[in-house]
Image (cartoon, rainbow, N blue to C red):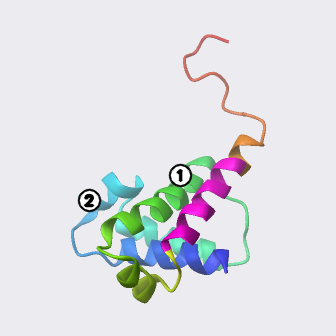
Amino acid sequence: MQKQLICETLRFHADRPDGDSSSIVRLGVDRSDATRMMEKAAGSESEFQLDEIHVLFAALVSAPVLMPSEEVFYERIGFFREQAFALAGGLMSAIGATPDRIGNPSGSD
């Protein structure tokens, strides 16, 4: 179920006709990379890099914003908005529970 929700929100973004610039603002990647992420999420590989998790998170939280109603969201995605937000929150919780391997982004360790 979670895979399908992620794939459908990525498909929504990859299929949008408003161009790659808009996709980069929404997701941080162009539409072809959104399609690649959708294929990866649909596959059996379950490991994602941090920048890829950002794309998943961005797709989940921005898709509900771009659709005018719960009904439109459900008809297009097949899930409720609350499920997308809950899954995005779950991604954040999972990231928060893992050790920070990036280090201090300010450069002062």
Q: Quick check: 88 above or below 101?
A: below
Q: Position of residue 10 (x, y in %)?
A: 46, 72
Element on which disc 2 rests: helix
Counting the numbered discs, the total is 2
> With 43 as the anchor, is 16 left or right in this view?
left
Q: Main secondary structure of the magenta part?
A: helix
The magenta stretch spans residue 19: no
- The quadrant of the image that shows the N terminus is bottom right
User: As rendered, which of 95 and 21 lies closer to the eye?
Assistant: 95
Q: Residue at x 38, y 73 (%)?
A: 14
Task: Write down the quadrant of residue 39 in the picture.
Answer: bottom right
Q: Quick check: 103 above or below 56?
A: above
Task: Write down the quadrant of residue 83 in the picture.
Answer: bottom right
Q: Quick one: label 1 or label 2, which is nearer the N terminus?
A: 2
The magenta stretch spans residue 82: yes
Q: Residue at x 73, y 50 (%)?
A: 94
Report if the CB atoms under discs 1 and 2 are less than 8 Å apart.
no
Q: Amino acid at mark 1?
A: His
Q: Position of residue 78 (x, y in %)?
A: 51, 86
User: As rendered, which of 85 and 41 lies closer to the eye?
Assistant: 85
Question: What residue range appears in magenta?
Answer: 81-93
> Seen from this angle, which residue lies furthest top?
108
Q: Position of residue 27 (x, y in %)?
A: 41, 57
> With 107 as the anchor, is 11 left or right in this view?
left
| Residue that badge 1 annotates | 54
> Label for residue 22?
2
Mark 2, Cα crowd under 10 Å, few <14 / some 14-19 / many 20+, is: some
> Label for residue 26?
none
Q: Residue at x 55, y 49 (%)?
A: 51
